[in-house]
Amino acid sequence: MVMDNANNALFVSAKSSSSLATKVSAVLSTSFSDGQFREALTLLDHRQFTNDAKRRRQIRINLQKDVIDNNGAIIDNFGRVAERLYCVKSTLGKLQAEYENMKTEVASAQSKTSPTLREAASLLQKREQIFVKQDVLSALAEHFLLSEAELVALTSTAEPVDEKFFDALSKAKRINKDCEILLGLQNQTFGLDLMEQTSKNLNFGFQKLYKWTQREFKTLNLENPQMNTSIRQALKVLAERPSLFQNCLSFFAEARECILSEAFHTALTGTTLSGIKDASIKPIDFAAHDMLRYAGDMLAWVHSATVSEREALEILFISEGEELAKGLKNGRNTEIWRLVADDDNENTEFNALETLHDLVDRDIAGVTRLFRQRLEQVVRTNEETLPAYKLATLLGFYGLTFEKLLGSASYLAESIHDLEVQAFRQFRSLLKDNIASIQNDSGKVSNDLAPPLFFSHALDQLDAIMHTYDSSISSSGVRDDELEGVLVDALEPFEFACNNIAKSMDPLKSAIFTVNCKIAASNCLAKFGFIKHRAELTRLNIREALTQIVQSQYEFFRVQSGLDPLFSSVDDSQVAFGSSIDGNILTKVSQQLDEFLPSALMDALDRVKYMQDTTLARQMTEEAADMFCKDFEKLEQMIDEIDSSTGMVSDETALRLRFPRTSTEIRVLLS
């Protein structure tokens, strides 16, 4: 028993020691950074705790006493709160009773006023519906009906065509289009009636605009290139009625044609159609004696008038082209007869540039007819070849100019090209007449074998023609066959006549004459780069005549030197040469050769002294001399071989001693 108590005491003591150690460890391990620990220390500081043994033993008791005191204060406070809550509960009960009374009274009043409120709501709803209908009616009238002022501005001829008219017309077109919506309703009567009335007003408006445009065209001044805005807008609107639009353009073209024709007549004569003279104008007819100036002045006036007319109308058809195209497309859809007419024509798109070109061409048509008559007369009465070609070139230049300006299908461009064809035809006709006229002079050749006078004239004429061709802007676009045609007509017949003359001469004179003619032709052609190929071809054709000259000079050297029989024998064979040669023949030939050689080259050159190209004459002679020297080398070699074969190289009877000339000496004397 005693043992058990002792053990228990030891166990308790050990446990207390362990608890204390644990607490001490916990206190020592607590960091000041711990918030609770730091707060506890702060509370101790506020209590001004005296750190002594008594205070440390009573600290726990004191703290517990403070807690109990605080809890008692809190309970007292909650008692007072409970009393207040009992008061609130009593107040809420009274409020609930008052609320129930008021709710009963409101329910009674609502049951009495609800019929009146429902009737008022119904009236307000009907009022809103009436307002909506009134707005719809106003919008419908505004959208689908023309006002009295708009109707007057659209249809009354007494009112001007101004912005009010165009606004009214635009609104009428919109109404007409929007009537399609009304036709989709169940009751179509209103839509049909409205469309009929609007269409009638639109037709009146277009007719008014059409007549106004015609009146404006009569007084339109195109000297100022800026066409006024009203006419441009009128034409854009009329494009929606293609028939009226085309009629306006036709009327305008006729009016402008008359004005331009009168202006051209005044420019030609200096007098108006009414007989009034204009002293400020120098009449073009005064230059009628000068064919090229006369034609050039007329064409320049026509070109100036065409450019001015195009610039005046360009602002309408180019800047407004898209709107015109759109209007014409819409207009074709409304004019049934035009749809039928366009069935066979797939390309019905509006081309502003083509329309512009066509209108300018129609404006200038009267002028075109007038100057075409005069130019045809000029072409027919001309009797000179070179002016005829210059006129054709001038017409070709203006033809290309007008083709770029108005298109190749224009009446003006076609007329100019027709006149160009007539001018070229007249030019070729005059060339043929000129060729026929030289038949009488074809046998007359000067003693110096120079080209005939008619051939020189032909080359001078060809030179002038080529200069005209080269200076013309149209030359770059002329086809090669046209240029070849000019050369065929202006050169080849004269070359053929010279060839016929050469056939009646002896070979050397014929060759020299031919070379002189072809060199003259080649020199004339070589001046122009665009026909150098023809000059080179002529040079190649000279070669045959030059070969004849070389052959004639070569025969001259052989015959006059006396070596022709020996050369012929050498050409046959060595056996024939050896059997036909002897010392006497070689001695005689050697003497003749010595007499010939001193003047051989001068005599040969004298034979070709009439070649106008002296350098070429010397070249041909030197070529013939070179052929002669080569034959002489063969002869010299043959003589040496015969002396070697007979063993008479050093004997007095050796052939070499009778014929001492060497090929080197011959070359020196003939060089």
Image: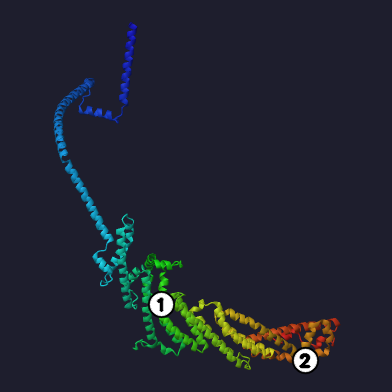
Which residue reaches farthest top? 1
Quarter of the rendering occupied by the C terminus? bottom right
Q: What count of labels does the image hold?
A: 2
Nearest to N terminus: mark 1 or mark 2: 1
Q: Which residue is mark 2?
A: 591
Q: Which residue is mark 1?
A: 362
The colour style of the image is rainbow
Q: Percent x, y for residue 262?
A: 37, 83
Disc 1 crowd, CA 10 A, few/some/many (<14, 14-19, 20+) = many
Q: Is residue 192 left or right of residue 111?
A: right
Q: Percent x, y for residue 391?
A: 48, 84
Residue 310 lies in what quarter of the image? bottom left
Disc 2 crowd, CA 10 A, few/some/many (<14, 14-19, 20+) = some
Can see residue 614?
Answer: no
Residue 88 lies in what quarter of the image? top left
Q: Residue at x 39, y 64 (%)?
A: 333
Residue 617 circle label: none
Which amino acid type is shown beneath numbered disc 1?
Answer: Arg
Residue 321, compared with residue 619, is above or below; it is: above
Which amino acid type is shown beneath numbered disc 2?
Answer: Gln
Q: Percent x, y for residue 87?
A: 14, 28
Q: Residue at x 75, y 89 (%)?
A: 559
Q: Nearer the viewer, residue 147 or 52?
A: 147
Q: CA distance from mark 1 to mark 2?
A: 93 Å
**Label 1 SS:** helix
Q: Residue at x 37, y 86 (%)?
A: 266
Q: Nearer the viewer, residue 464 or 362?
A: 362
Q: Is residue 209 left or right of residue 86?
A: right
